[in-house]
Image (spheres, grey):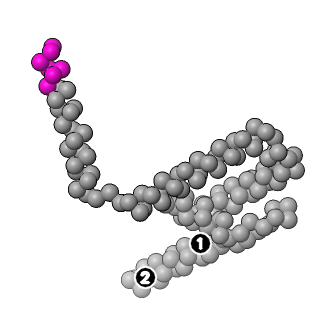
Amino acid sequence: MDKKVIALGAAALLIAGAANAELKAFKVNGETVTVAEQKAIYDRAVQAGQPAGEGLERQVKNLLIQQTVLLQEANKAKIANKPDVKRAIENSRDQILIQGLAQDWAQKNPVSEADLKKAYDQDKAPTATRNIRSATSS
């Protein structure tokens, strides 16, 4: 009996592993969607709590098909050349660069536990004083 359970468990692991191995590059109107593109979305979804497996793989594939088709249509219609769209793209690019700079700075300048406690204690002190003043004013 134990051997059957072990064999079934091993089979389940193989199936789960095979499900993850099912990511394959595919084409949408001649444009290739790579395994790397699929895996990036798949992995983010799993990190966010989505259950891994064939269902998620199908969702990722469907999402990328829709996205690819819509981007192809947007390119055909030359949407990126519209002034308001150009401005929005530039604004998004600027925000991404600013965010990248902030992340880079945070990595190079980590905050210590002592600094956090000091900031917390400093922030807490004025609040306690305000609460005492409010209580005595009433």
**What residue do we see at 15% from left, 15% from top?**
137
Q: Which image quadrant is residue 111 in?
A: bottom left
Q: Main secondary structure of the magenta part?
A: helix
Q: How crowded is mark 1: few (under 14 residues within 10 Å), some or many (20 or more)?
A: some
Pick whichever, 92 or 69, lies toward us. 92
Q: In this view, does 37 lie above or below 70?
A: below
Pick whichever, 116 or 57, lies toward us. 116
52 relative position to 70: left or right: left
- x and y, in percent, of residue 123 in the image: 24, 39
**Which amino acid type is shown beneath numbered disc 1?**
Asn
Pick whichever, 54 or 138, lies toward us. 138
Q: Is residue 26 magenta?
A: no
Q: Is residue 83 above or below residue 67?
A: above
**What residue do we see at 42% from left, 62% from top?**
107
Q: Which residue lies furthest to the right in this view?
A: 76
Judge whether residue 49 can be spotted in this image.
Answer: no
What's drawn in magenta, residue-wise? Answer: 132-138
Q: Which residue lies furthest to the top in this view?
A: 138
Q: Is residue 14 above or below residue 92?
A: below
The numbered dot on residue 20 is 1
**Which amino acid type is shown beneath numbered disc 2?**
Ile
Judge whether residue 112 can be spotted in this image.
Answer: yes
Kindly identify which residue carries mark 2: 6
**What residue do we see at 65% from left, 65% from top?**
38
SS for tag 2? helix
SS for tag 1? helix
